[in-house]
Image (spheres, rainbow, N blue to C red):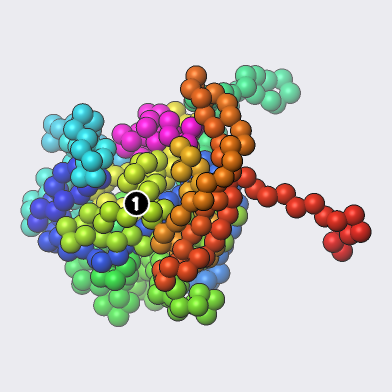
Amino acid sequence: MADVYNWQLGRTMQYPYEEKHPRWQFAFVFNANRCIGCQTCSMACKSTWTFSKGQEYMWWNNVESKPYGGYPQFWDVKILKMLDEAHKQAGLSAAWEGSQKDGARRPYGVYNGMTIFEAAVKRYGPDGHKRAIGYIPTDAEWRAPNIYEDTSTGYEPGPMGFAKEGVSLPEHKTWFFHLQRICNHCTYPACLAACPRKALYKRPEDGIVLIDQSRCRGYRMCVEACPYKKSMYRATTRVSEKCVACYPRIEGKDPLSGGVPMETRCMAACVGKIRLQGLVKINEDGSWAEDRSHPLYYLVKVEKVALPLYPQFGTEPNGYYIPPRWVPRPYLRQMFGPGVDDAIAKYLAPPREMLAVLQLFRTTQKMIFRYAIEEGPKIFETQINGKPWAMYNDTIIGFDKTGKEAVRVTVEEPVYERPKERPNSI
Ligand code: SF4
Ligand code: SF4
Ligand code: SF4
């Protein structure tokens, strides 16, 4: 095991391979507040990549309703329980030390518990046969991706079937939310760490994690080790498969792209406009190169409004979520770490620049590498949590990899009135 630095945990951790980082990293932000659970993203992926024999139960993109839903069923409850048991056996606690925040190196403080890799060292030894704790889901658990869809907690209906009490912020007593999931193309992938055939690799040009189908022998060690359960076994070919990050689009090979990187199929299809995807520049030490006007850098590193999913697993996932604001905080802190309270406070009263950046979600299929803002007039003012807050109709412009304008959008959605001579468009 080598010592590698994981900035999401604010410390070095043990990982089977030495640190080596790509030049760019595929990353994305999902705004969980906006998802309507329509599954258009899931269908976009399925109709592109997993429509063949043996892939019937394979959903590289899935959207599950939390807290009860999961694909495979109960994936996060199971791995959290395993990690919890490992801590109990070792007499350790898995707490975060929030007072040790320090800029980009420790934005959320320090995680003092064990990761899935460290728990494996504890249980099997440093040269043990398992590189991460995990499990292989049963066929039944993979079978129904939408079980518990739209099922809320604690619903107590009155005589007419309606809830007796309404709900109000900051936390709803009756709640659910949609969690959108694809492979996180992790910085320290557990799938890659576990594979005895070295069939998995992380591309140096964009950090995408792929499985070499000719090397894979279907041992399912990656399926067992991935804590997010995003590596899947295909019985017809007897090898494992996973999200390929639509790499031809990232490479600008899609005929639609005009040669510049494009968003993936699941991102580009999102009806709720909850997804923003990009490539972030990575320094040699694995940190994100400072890039103030890159939308992902701004949301993740500057405002810290988007947070990693279960950072405590230790894979340094490259998917980030703006947490749903109505959900009880202890649940969210377990899922997204200790940055949740600050992130929600930011999202509830977004700074002027952030409100403009949030408009970029799903406005172009081209990947945005830089944005610029043209200031507009004040159009609304109010008080949020006793503090004055104002909205400005700024215009945000997104630029593609070549620096060409890809999109221009205002904070206030423009209204177009149909001329009188054309009362309808048919
Ligand atoms: S999410 Fe899972 S499959 Fe994807 S890179 Fe991370 S460990 Fe591997
Ligand atoms: S990035 Fe591409 S391959 Fe991956 S889940 Fe989305 S559509 Fe599927
Ligand atoms: S397409 Fe967008 S809004 Fe619809 S389920 Fe997927 S992530 Fe949510």
Comparing 187 with 299, the one in front is: 299
| Other residues around mark 1 within 10 Å, as few (<14) / some (14–19) / many (≥20) | some
Looking at the image, the residue that sits furthest to the right is: 421
Quadrant assignment for the N terminus: bottom left
Q: Which residue does the numbered mark 1 point to in the structure image? A: 292
Residue at coordinates 15% horizontally, 32% vertically from top-left?
92
Looking at the image, residue 12 lies above or below residue 202: above
Q: Above or below — where is 180 with respect to 333? A: below
Q: Which residues are magenta?
A: 329-350
Quarter of image, res 424: bottom right
Local secondary structure at mark 1 = loop
User: Is there any visible trace of residue 64 in the rendered image?
Assistant: no
Q: Classify residue 66 as left or right of residue 313.
A: right
Residue beneath the point at 33% across and 60% down: 280
* Residue positioned 52% across, 65% down in the render: 406
- Measured from the top left, where is residue 196 in percent x and y? 19, 68
